[in-house]
Every structure is written in C-alpha cells, then in structure tokens.
Image: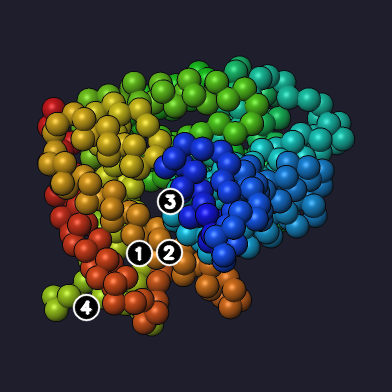
Amino acid sequence: MPAAAFVYRALGLMSRLKVRHLGVENENGEICGIITSRDLLRLRAQEAVILGNEIDQADDVPALGAAWARLPQAAEGLLAEGVSARDIAAVISRELGALTRRAAIIAESRMVESGSGAAPSPYALAVLGSAGRGESLLAMDQDNALVFADGAPDGPEDTWFAHLGVHIADILHEVGVPYCRGGAMARNPLWRGSLDTWRARIGGWIERSSPQDLLSVDIFFDMLGVHGDVALCNDIWRAGFDAAKGRADFAKLLAESVGPTEPGLTFLRRFRTDQGRIDLKKSGLFGIVSTARALAICHHVVERSTPARLDGIKTLGIAAESDLEALVEAQGTFLALLVAQQVEDIGRGVPPSNAVAVGRLSSRDSARLRSALDAVRHLDQLTRDLLFKG
C-alpha cells in the first residue's frame, strides 16, 4: 500500500487478500515499512478504544462521565475513516451497553455502602430498543430492564432491585444518557421482575386487545443482557418470542401502537420539512424497525438487529426479496444521513436529534433519501399483508 493511503483502504486490502501484514511503499515505490492488521485497528478506532477502556476502568460517576463525553469524537473519527453508519451504530450500541454495565457496578457499590447489602438473588441487567438491536446513534435516552431469579412484586427482592434501578437511572442520567421519556427503565415496576413475574407479564401483553395498553412493550423484544447472569435475560427474551409465535393479532397491535409512518415527501416529491429539516425517525427509520420487529415476532425470527430480522423473513419466502432488500437499503441510508448530521451538529454545539437539514445534502444524498422514502411509502400496508402470511 502507498504510505499516503487511507487506513480503510489498507484494511479492505487485508480483508480481500486474507493477509495480516502489508508492505508500505514510499512515493518512489520503495518498501519503507511494514504495517499489521493490529496496527491498523489501533489507528482506525483509537478514540473508540480509548472510550471503551475508560468506561471499563471508571470507578466513579465523574470518571464515567468523562469517558462517555468521548463518544461523539469516537463516532466522528470512525465516520472520517469511512466506517459505515451501520457499523458506527453498532459501536455506539456496544459502548452504551458497557456504560450501562459500569453504571450497575457503581450502583451495586452504593447499595452495599448504604447498608442494603449485596443482591438478594442472581440477576441480569439488559438494554432495550436500539441499544439491544445494535442500532443506536448519538441522540439517545435510557432503555433498560432487570431480570432476577426469584422474588415477588413488592417483595424484599423486588424492593432491593427497585433501589438498584433508581441508582442506575440516576447515574446514566448524570453522565449524559437522559431518563427515558416513556419510562422504560428498571426503576419502574413494568421493567423489572423475577422470571415468574416476567413470564406472567408477557402472557398479559399477548392477551391484551388495546394498542394503548402495549405502548413501549415492543422494545422488550430487543432485550440484550449486558451485566450479571445474562442467561436470565436470554431465557425471558426467547420466552417472549415463543409465546408470541404465530400471534399475528398481537404483532399487529404492537406495530399499530407506534403509529403510522409520516410521509417524507410531498405530492411534488419535495421533502416535508420543519424549519428546513426532515425527521428521518418519524419518516421512515422507526417504521422499518417496527415492521421488522413485528414480522420477526409473528413469524418467530429470533433475531435482534433489523437487517437480520428482515433477512430471516426473506428466507421464509413470504415476501418479495426486492421489497425487503429495499428496506435494508433504506435503513442504511437513514442511518448514514443521521450519523453525519449528528456529528456535525455536536461539533457546532447543537444537541443531536433525528432531523436532517436537507439544505446540506448533496444531489447524490438527496436522491438516495428520496429512494429511501419511496421504499417506506407503503410500509403500513406491507406490514399488515405479511403478518398474516405463512
């Protein structure tokens, strides 16, 4: 490789040739050094590596906050190296999981120091929603849950874990991950419980008939254990899929509970904007995620990420492959435009959001966005059609 080549070019060549070392040429074509895959990984993800190490080593809230403050810089570095938005979202999600785990460790210490003692039962802490799917970006809030082996609601075990959940939520909020506006946090009774409590709760969800009763329930199916005995989380997560298998009525209600996808284009194919920005979460990203989740629940595709769920549906042969591939492509476009906008906004001191300024888009990106919005135009109808197939 030329000495002036970008890191991602060298990584791509190594991957393509299945080699771990490359000769480095100067401008005269002479070998001037050797570089290894490990060297490149360190160079490419230096900020992400530092971020991960500092999160894992933080022993108090200020140190944890200082580590988490590196996240935008890490995302910017990965973006500059040509890392895909989907991979950047996976990195953000993994580090959010690591942050949540570290918050739990600090919270456990607080419980012991306050005289409440150690955990009264084996337990696991999980992240939900985009963090569980590996699709988080820089505009986020908390989504977490607790699963413990034994204990009745309002019993001594539940009371201990309620206090733990409060500490975890407070720590995460203090370091920069805001409280969940929908209340999906382990400090709230709906998002913690023993194995028996969770099984009864899942049964209740599936038998309910009102979308209003199922608000925020969908993110349970994205559950990913990040601390403790994570097998407890996996058992309950799989139990949810098993209980909902074939229940198109339940999956349909879950999809309806998040509301319809808002049209992103006008009749004249102009972008629908508010103060020059289009909300890509409302105009398509959330719809794709919800469709993939609902179909996975109904057809027992036990996966977390949106592409994996859509790929699983594809293997069932119940939908046109082109439709599902268009949704995967559209999600990738939405993620790419959002992560670029969020990195830019943070650099300018603007809080990150799910809205993209259309005036900053190149003609190529504008065309990509129109194609992505076209792909989700009939998303609600597609969801209804595929739920009752198979």
Whether residue 217 is visible: no
Q: Amino acid at mark 1?
A: Leu
Tell me what residue is drawn at x 55 percent, y 31 percent: 225
Q: Secondary structure at mark 3?
A: helix
Q: Residues within 10 Å of mark 4 (few under 14, many from 20)?
A: few
Q: Give the label, 1 or 2, closer to the camera.
A: 2
Question: Pointer 1 and pointer 2: residues touching (CB < 8 Å)?
Answer: yes
Nearest to N terminus: mark 4 or mark 2? 4
Q: Is residue 47 left or right of residue 54?
A: left
Q: Residues within 10 Å of mark 3 (few under 14, many from 20)?
A: many
Nearest to N terminus: mark 1 or mark 2? 1
Question: Pointer 3 and pointer 2: residues touching (CB < 8 Å)?
Answer: no
Residue 355, compared with residue 39, is above or below; it is below
Q: Amino acid at mark 2?
A: Leu
Q: Quadrant of residue 110?
A: top right
Q: Amino acid at mark 3?
A: Arg
How far separated are the C-alphas under marks 1 and 3?
Answer: 15 Å
Give the number of the disc on residue 73: none
In the rendered image, which residue does mark 3 sit on? Answer: 86
Nearest to N terminus: mark 1 or mark 3? 3
In the rendered image, which residue does mark 2 sit on? Answer: 338
Tell me what residue is drawn at x 65 percent, y 26 percent: 228
How far separated are the C-alphas under marks 1 and 4?
Answer: 14 Å
Residue 200, compared with residue 100, is above or below; it is above
Q: Give the label, 1 or 3, closer to the camera.
A: 3
Tell me what residue is drawn at x 38 percent, y 45 percent: 215
Give the number of the disc on residue 280: 1
How far separated are the C-alphas under marks 1 and 2?
Answer: 8 Å
Percent across and percent down for residue 324 are: 21, 45
How far separated are the C-alphas under marks 3 and 2?
Answer: 11 Å
Q: Is residue 175 left or right of residue 144?
A: right
